[in-house]
């Protein structure tokens, strides 16, 4: 079997990759853009976790939509500016409530998910903060001191004290 590395630590067979490509290309409906899945070997799905990521001068913010998961079930790690989010969405068909039910439609995604993202800037993982509200995970990662913008004071050669350009003293004789 040929395996291929896709998106970090996720290994999939060539068949799974082709199934995913076909599903992502030809499937229709709004759910396809939110959750795309490839069939796994155990009948569950490997879920691709959608993310939004943006940066300000002070921090990087990662937002993930993870409906149906308890916050305690989310495994979130940061290692050398690589953020990894792992977890599992339970199959509603295997719940106690759904036992002996006749199913007419079963489209809700279930299975394990993992998403790794290497950030383009250094962050201070010790000061990271994560919140989870209504199925939305929001991770605030302060930029490392070395990655934050710095204002540099300009000084003249004859006067070693820094001078502010706005003070009007630059160019005065």
Image (cartoon, grey):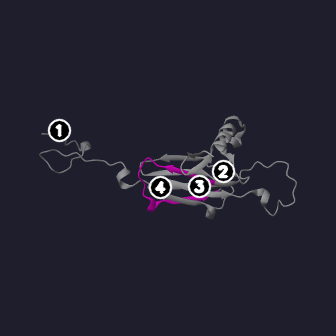
Q: Are marks 2 and 1 in contact (CB under 8 Å)?
A: no
**Residue 57 at what x, y percent from top left?**
41, 48
Q: Residues within 10 Å of mark 3 (few under 14, many from 20)?
A: some
Residues 59 and 4: in front is 4
Q: For mark 1, what is the residue? A: 171
Q: Which mark is first along the chain, 3 or 2? A: 2
| Distance between mark 4 and mark 2 Cα atoms | 27 Å
Q: Are marks 3 and 4 in contact (CB under 8 Å)?
A: no
**Residue 53 at what x, y percent from top left?**
52, 47
The quadrant the C terminus occupies is top left
Mark 4: secondary structure: strand
Question: Is residue 90 shown left or right of residue 118?
Answer: right
Q: Which mark is residue 137?
A: 3
Q: Which mark is residue 141?
A: 4
Q: For mark 2, what is the residue? A: 46
Q: Nearer the viewer, mark 2 or mark 3?
A: 2
| Distance between mark 2 and mark 1 Cα atoms | 65 Å
Mark 1: secondary structure: loop
Q: Residues within 10 Å of mark 1 (few under 14, many from 20)?
A: few
Q: Are marks 4 and 2 in contact (CB under 8 Å)?
A: no
Residue depicted at x 59% and y 51%: 64
Query: Residues in magenta?
Result: 113-133
Residues 61 and 112: in front is 112
């Amino acid at each position: 079997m040929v395996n291929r590395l896709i998106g970090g630590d996720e290994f999939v067979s060539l068949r799974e990759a082709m199934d995913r490509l076909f599903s992502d290309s030809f499937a229709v409906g709004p759910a396809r853009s939110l959750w795309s899945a490839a069939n796994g070997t155990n009948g569950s799905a490997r879920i691709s976790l959608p993310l939004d990521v943006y940066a300000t001068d002070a921090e990087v913010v990662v937002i993930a939509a993870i409906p149906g998961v308890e916050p305690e079930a989310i495994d979130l790690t940061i290692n050398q500016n690589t953020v990894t989010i792992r977890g599992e969405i339970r199959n509603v068909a295997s719940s106690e409530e759904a036992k002996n039910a006749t199913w007419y439609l079963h489209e809700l995604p279930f299975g394990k998910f993992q998403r790794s993202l290497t950030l383009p800037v250094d962050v201070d993982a010790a000061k990271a903060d994560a919140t989870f509200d209504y199925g939305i995970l929001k991770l605030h990662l302060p930029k490392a001191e070395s990655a934050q913008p710095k204002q540099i004071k300009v000084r003249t050669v004859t006067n070693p004290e820094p001078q502010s350009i706005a003070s009007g003293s630059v160019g005065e004789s």
